[in-house]
Image (tube, grey):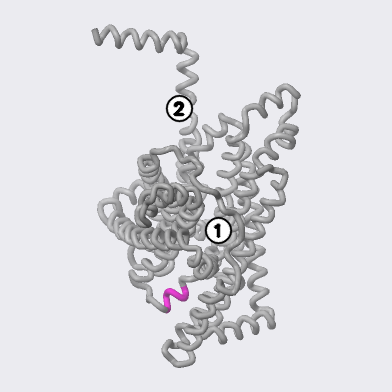
Amino acid sequence: MNGVLSRNRRWLRGTLRGPITTQGRSYRVGVRLLPWVLPIGIALLWAVASRQHWMSEQILPAPALVWQSAVEFGSGELWGHLWISLQRLFWGLAVGIGGGLLLGVWLGASRRAQTLVLPTFVALAQIPTLAWIPLFMLFFGIGELLKLVVLVKAVVVPVTLHTLVGVRDAQPKLREAAAALGLPRHLVLLRLLLPAALPAFLTGVRLALATGWTSLLAVELLASSEGIGYLMVWGRQLFMLDLVLLCILVIGLVGAVLERGFSVVEKRLLFWPQAATGEQQRGPLPRGWQSLLLPLALLAVWQASSSSGWVDSNILASPLDVLHTLLVGLADGSLPEALLLSLQRTLTGLVLGGGAGLLAGLLLGLSQPAERFFGPSLSALRQVALFAWVPLLTAWLGLGEGAKHVFVGLAAFFPLLIATQRGIASLSPQLGEAASTLRLNLWQRLRLLVLPGAAPAIFAGLRLSLIYAWLGTIGAEYFMPSDGGIASLMIGAQQLFRMDQVMAAMLLIGLVGALLGTLGQRLESRATRWRTA
């Protein structure tokens, strides 16, 4: 009986699908093989270039040499360094996510905390993690504590901010329900607010995984004698680019596993429909004299500690010294000159990388064959943490402006690519029907339908690309030393133990990052002001 039912089901499915022709089978096989054409083609070109000696083996090692390194280092040394990095990542994520969850719940549930603490937290968060590393080095040395502190700083910010939004925006409706049910305060938090904030919290955790993995590699490139980042630096110093390429492959695989594993966990945790349970509260951060209490108190304690000699001025300069150094640097032109050079690199990288990301996003969004052909390869490259490319870029392009522009462009490329492609994918199918009815050509469809419809997503991606380009500029000046730039100035000041200059540069980096974020928001709002709420 079961066999008859099984045959009937197969017959019914075959009837609904229609006859499978040889041409249909060939088409489906071609669709499945299409994503492999590009990586196989690149691998063949790589093999031919190595065999024909188009480039030196020190610059472009042969695939066989990379495989030999995989066999040699994969027997133990590679996995030993990777295990050390993963242990650091685990503890950084554990402390950062736990701290971010507690801080985000507190800030989201307490209006007073939002007024007193949130502005100071956001101001400190504007300073990129890389800019904190010189100061952290002097405080914590270059041992394991430095890696943990850098990781916690990178992780706690996105988790805190997203948890805060989830708890805060879920409050109005849920508090009414809790009051009607007569629930005690701890049950309101455990049964209502935290489940309602879970989607936002998980979004923060997803960002924390990416930023934490990237920040760990950055600090291992700068100051470490163990870990996958250190192994890349060691291979770069010995011109063993086969080892560098192997490490990049492993880093990409780890990033892909983290992304895929988190997606599985997220689907299991978010098993209920995520309807709007609260009212989104848009608007600026809380303002007023109360918001100044915490920063003024911190500055007073800081100044008193420096004046009383509780803290060595070589480690932590006083606020007055930092302010004096900032004013002197602005007056003599050294800080504006360094800042202008960094901004030029940011703009150049944004134009190159962001422009390429926009064009690639349009291509992948408008053409299904192009998405099948290029999409999987680009997704694989996106899993490689940004700073993992530094040893390879410096080996291929040197330490000049070209390498910096490529690195900044790489940082700005993927946000616009992803935003543009998703913006086009979310367009209504009726737009395509309207374009066919009006017989619009490709340019008219782009100008009149596609670009206006995808504009909110594109400008959101532009805002992210602008921020990432600035962060990429700081990283490029860190890892590719040059004669100018705000991060280069900070590194030079650190080597001379001029902490007043280091902290003045940190302040400018944070201010510029905040201004660029505000500029991106203004551009997004102005370009999409035609939207209705």
Q: Residue at x 34, y 67 (%)?
A: 225
Which percent across, then down, holds residue 378? Answer: 51, 42
Q: Is there any visible trace of residue 451 in the rendered image?
A: yes
Which percent across, then down, holds residue 254? Answer: 37, 49
Please state which of the two labelled residues, at mark 1 or mark 2, is closer to the viewer. 2
Which percent across, then down, holds residue 65? Answer: 37, 48
Mark 1 to mark 2 CA distance (whole Å): 36 Å
Residue 150 sits in quarter: bottom left
Kind of residue at disc 1: Leu
Query: Which mark identifies residue 206?
Result: none
Q: Is there any visible trace of residue 60 in the rendered image?
A: no
Q: Depth check: 422 or 290 in front? A: 290
In the image, is residue 295 part of the stretch drawn in magenta?
A: no
> Is residue 257 found left or right of 358 in the rendered image?
left
Residue at image mark 1: 397
Kind of residue at disc 2: Arg
Residue 519 sits in quarter: bottom right
Sequence-earlier tag: 1 or 2: 2
Q: Depth check: 217 or 77 in front? A: 217
Which percent across, then down, holds residue 374? Answer: 53, 37
The main secondary structure of the magenta stretch is helix
Around disc 1, counting alpha carbons within 10 Å, would you say few (fewer than 14), some (14 to 19), or many (20 or more)?
A: some
Q: Which residues are magenta?
A: 134-138
Around disc 2, counting alpha carbons within 10 Å, would you say few (fewer than 14), some (14 to 19), or many (20 or more)?
A: few
Residue 8 sits in quarter: top left
Q: Residue at x 34, y 51 (%)?
A: 69
Q: Secondary structure at mark 2?
A: helix
Q: Residue furthest bottom?
A: 308
Q: Secondary structure at mark 1?
A: helix
Residue at image mark 2: 32
Cβ–Cβ under 8 Å for marks 1 and 2? no
Q: Residue at x 60, y 46 (%)?
A: 357
